[in-house]
Each structure stands twice: as C-alpha cells, then as structure tokens.
Amino acid sequence: MQNGNLVFGGTRWRSLLVAAVAMIGTLWTSVAMATITQGDFSVFGFFESREAGHWGEGSSSINSTPTTLVHPTATSTFSIPGKSFGITGGSFDFNHWDLAEMRQLADVRPDYHTVKNYKLLGRFDTLFVKDADFFAYYRPWYDAVGSLKSIGRSRPNTDAIPYSHSQSTDSGLTQNGSLQNEYFKNDLREYYGQLNFTDNFSARIGKQQVIWSEADALSGTEVTNPVNATWHGVYGAESAEDTRTNLRMVKLNYILPDFLKTANNELEGFWIPGDFEGAGIKLNGDPRNPYVVPAAFGGGCVVCGSGPDGIFPVNINQNGQIINASEAPNFDPKGMIFIPVGPLSTKGGVACTKAGKGGCFATGEFYDFHAIDLSSTPSNSIQNSEFGARYSSLLPIGNGLQASFIYLYEYRSALGKTCYQCGPGVTGDSSAVTLAPGTFLLPGKFLHGPPRPGVQKGGAVEVFSTTDYRRNNFFGLTGTYYDKDLTDIVYRYDFLYQPKINVAVPGVVDARGGEWTEFTRWIIAGDRPTYIPWLSKQHTFLTAQLTETWYPDRPALATTPTATNGKTRELSTLAFLAATNWLMNGQLTATNVFLWDVDDNTGELSTTNVYRYSRNVLFGVNAQWFIGRSGRFTDPYLFSREQRFNELEFTLTYEI
C-alpha cells in the first residue's frame, strides 16, 4: 500500500520516520560531539487526556411508517415512501448525552540550536549562516470513541457502515473514513530550520504556519494555512494552532532601517513550491463522527426536483423511508432518491387525483444516489507554487499606528460546478438516460446493494460535477493602535479584499451551479486590562471584536457551498466579548466568551478553565453551549444547527 499506512510510502510513516531520524541524529550528535555546550538541545511539551460528551442531541421518536407497494395494474408495481424516525433535542435538552471524545495525545517540541557564531555544531564554518535553529512539533493522538462505537453517532435508521481499520468499504461510494483516518493521528505538524544570515536578514525553511493577522476570531487576512476542522473542529481545548494546516514553504524576512519618521519597518515574503492542502476550511462530513459539520440541507432536500406535489425527497434509507436529513449529521451514506414516475394512488392501491389530500400519494421508484466530482486537486508541482508578501511599519500617526500590507496569490477558493457539458457516456454505462445537465439515470444498476424485501428500486442516479481550482489574489491590511491617552485600549483592525470567491447558486441563476464573486471582511477589536476588585486581585483582560462580512457583488440566490444551503447575506455581522481572569493567586486561568451572530440571533457561550494543581499537572474543564434561534437554514456560522452539539470537556495535562 504505497499510499496507505503499511509501508514507508505512507504519510504517517514518513512523518514518523522524519521525527525519528531527527531525534536519533540529535541525540547521537550530542553524545559524539563533546564540544556542544549544554542547552543547545531542548524538548518541551505535554501529555494530555481529554474526555468530552455532547448534550442536546435528543433521541429518536417512534412514529415511523414503512414503505408501501401499490399495483395500479396487474403488471406494474410502484412505491409510496414511508417515514423514518423523527428527531428531538436542542440546546436545552439535557436528557440525552453522547460520548464525543476519549482522546489521548502528546505534544512534543524539540529545538536544536545548530549554528552559533557561524559555527555548525560548534566546529564547521558556515560562511554565511550566522545563527540557526531546527524546530519540530510532533503531535500524535488516539481517540477511543471510534473503537468503542462501531457506527459512531449515526442514527439507527440510517445505513451506517461500521468502522474498520482499513480504508473505506463499498468502493468509496459512501463513508470513506476509517478508524486510522478519523481516530488515529501520527502528525509531525511542523519542522523547519530558522536561519539567521545577519541581524536584519533571516529565512525559515520547512513545514510551518504564517500568521500575519491581528484579529482573534474569524480573521480576514489569516488565509495561507487552511483550517482543518475534521479532528475536533473549534470545540473545547483545541487551539487555533492545532487546527491550522501547516505547509512546506520558504519564508524570508528582512528588517529595514527607519525612514520618513517610520519605525519597525519589515518586509516578509514566502514561497510555497507546490503543497496543496485544501482550498478552504476542511469539514468532517462523516455522519458517524461526533464532529461532523452540522451543515443544513435547505429544508431536508439535498437535491430537489419537481413532482406532482411540489418537491420529492432525495434522502431515503434503503428501507424506503424518508429520513430527517435536514443536516449532514443525520445523512444516510447509502441514501436513495424517489422519482414519482407512477400514477397518484392511495396506500390501498386506489387511484386518486390530488397528491397530499385525503391519503392520496405520488407513486414511483427508488434509485440509489451518488454524487461524483470529476476534478482532481492541484498536484504538488513547482508549477503550482503559491506566494505571499507583507510589508509592516509603525507609522507616525498619534501614538504610533502599526500597519501591515499583505498580498497573497494562493489556491484558497474552489468553485464547484455542475458538469452541464457531460453526456451520458461519462457514466460508463450505455443504458444511462439523461435527466438533467450532469444528472443521469442508470436502470438496473444498484450502487448500494440489491433491493431489500418490500422495497422497489429501479437503479441509480449519478450526478457529476467539476471543481475549478485556481490561484486567486488576496489583498489585506492589518495592524494595531495603542490609545494610551484616553481609553488605554489596544485597538486591532483587519481587512481583506478577495476579488474572486466561490458561491453556489441554483440552476435558474446559472446552469453550472456556481459563480465567482467579490468578498470583503472588516474587523475591529479592542483589548483592555481592567481591575475588578471583587473578582480577582489581578487584572481581567477584556477583548471585544466586531466582524462585518460584505459581498459587494453577490449573485442572486447565492449560498455558501462549504456551510449551508441557506442564503448568503450581502452583509453579516458577528460579534464577541471575551474575559480572561487569573484566579486563586494565578493558579486558575478562566476564559469566558460570548459570541453572537447579530443577523440570525444565534451564538454560543464558551468557557475554558485550567487549574495548575502542581508544577507539572493541570486540570481543565471546558464547555460550549450554543444558544439562540434554532432550526435555521440561513445561518452562515452554523450556530443554530450546532445546538445538538453542545459540549462538556475534561482535560488532564502533564507538562514535560
């Protein structure tokens, strides 16, 4: 398995091998080279255990009905879909808890000072490298949830596939996450060399992060390292550092002299020589995983079409029952669609005239459903290089306005489009029939197994799409201003302009199903330490931030393809207020955050608390409670749908 995990061609083994070689090399050198002074090599980090549960998920009710077969003529058979279990629950439902996390992880960070005063390992003259360090960040973990629960959090009415240690079953047509991919992680997250050529000029080469933004949440200019929310998302103790995807790059830094009353002038640039790790935020789409993104499906339809009674449902389990699939966590990986090709009828087989009235139903056939993307991601080739640059300066405005001007040229938006130019030949089946652009019916082809008893299945429907991966331009401005005269507040600002960002649109707007449009994000924030005597003997650090997102040229009926099928607002506002306190003589650090989507009246309350029990042992309690209006499909930040994912987490940490 060259691309798997069984030989050294696998990514995990390759990362482990790099870490092992680095560790052995440094230890061997430390023993063999007696001239290395003590302290050149150091290791720090921690070991941690995390346990968490979700509340608000509710339970399944019992008002299900089976599918019905009707025979309008002696030689014809059609189906009337049944209904599966409904779902209860919500933010204030404490009756049902579900295990979400049993994670054991390590955080190991070796640092080796390899060059000092132009001497490599204290012996060899480097000529032009004055000082250098080698740094690595190794973060393996194992989560027992997948081993304890064979189908994870999946609902019993869906056709969930039990986890296996190998790659997916069913030829990748359904759930493609294995235990190794979702609950085992052997992650060498960072490894780079910091090379200082002079006091003003340096380079950093290796796998790393580039953080130029001054914003705290929902940053505009933090574009380069894609967010990976598949392992734990934004929940609990997971930090922003651990959700960013590190990239292999060369980053150069040059400190310029002061001029024209400016100070702290600095020029940075980086080159990513082909290391595509995603065009945007990575979300978990596996319904079995506790951290599957709760993306809404616009009223329960993944793909909707016209039928005698308006729309017909498309997420039906293999028992022929309509399931409550208004969001991804309740999706059936072996879902079928229903096409009303038969006459109107009652469940008793009596013909009728108006669907939905007096027990009159549309009859038809079930078809397995499969969506296929024909595009491949950009290869890791130097021809697909990405670039970025930042110029920073302290401008002579007031007490000093720090400003950073940013330009990026990166793959960070991918436009998904219906393959409207595809013919039925793309299916590889000569019997394929065109239903719509890029949509084909394959009679008698069963993608998810043969029909079950009492279920009439006519074949499969395949929908083909393509993805336009392209490097886009990004223009950013970020910085800080300290007003020490009036408010004693550090103001932070962040602005991003993106000429092209992908949005989804219905076929009535564009047959391709997607368009490029403009995007801007405006952020203003303030930090202030405030002494509250009755709360703590130390200062409380207050942070407030307001984020405004504006689509200046938003297409009609646009939706956000990576979040929900609800509308994309031209203007949307997100605000938060955070307070950090140091209590019990500094032993307890508590951070409380109130985050609110102003347009949708949804948000969250979160608290993160760490108590230092001893020099090396820390206990933590964290919680996230999603509140506000529920069941919305126009919520761009998913807070309303996350009300089934409220989390309580406990941590035990031992520092090295």
Image (cartoon, rainbow, N blue to C red):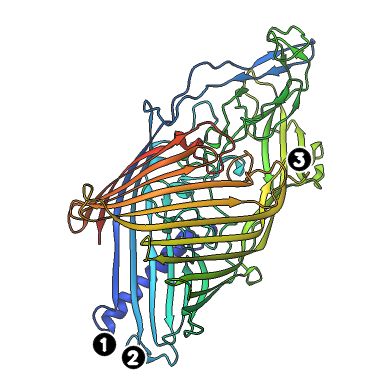
Say which amino acid is labelled 3: Gly
Q: Which element type, helix, strand or loop, lies under badge 1?
A: loop
Residue at the (82%, 44%) spot, across then down = 423
The correct choice, above or below, for 175 with respect to 93 in the image is below
The numbered disc on residue 35 is 1
Percent coordinates x, y for residue 324 in the rendering: 56, 27
On the image, numbered disc 2 is attached to which residue? 123
On the image, numbered disc 3 is attached to which residue? 507
- Residue 189 image-quadrant placement: bottom left
Task: Determine whether, in the image, residue 491 is placed left or right of residue 565.
Answer: left
The correct choice, above or below, for 438 with respect to 332 in the image is below
Q: Earlier in the sequence, mark 2 or mark 1?
A: 1
Percent coordinates x, y for residue 12 in the rendering: 46, 59
Q: Which element type, helix, strand or loop, lies under badge 2?
A: loop
Task: Determine whether, in the image, residue 235 is placed left or right of residue 431.
Answer: left
Q: Are the residues at dot 2 and dot 1 in contact (C-beta closer than 8 Å)?
A: yes
Disc 1/disc 3 C-alpha distance (Å): 71 Å
Determine crowd level at label 1: few under 14, some 14-19, many 20+ residues with C-alpha closer than 10 A: few
Task: Determine whether, in the image, residue 348 is placed left or right of residue 619.
Answer: right
Q: Earlier in the sequence, mark 1 or mark 3?
A: 1
Determine crowd level at label 2: few under 14, some 14-19, many 20+ residues with C-alpha closer than 10 A: few
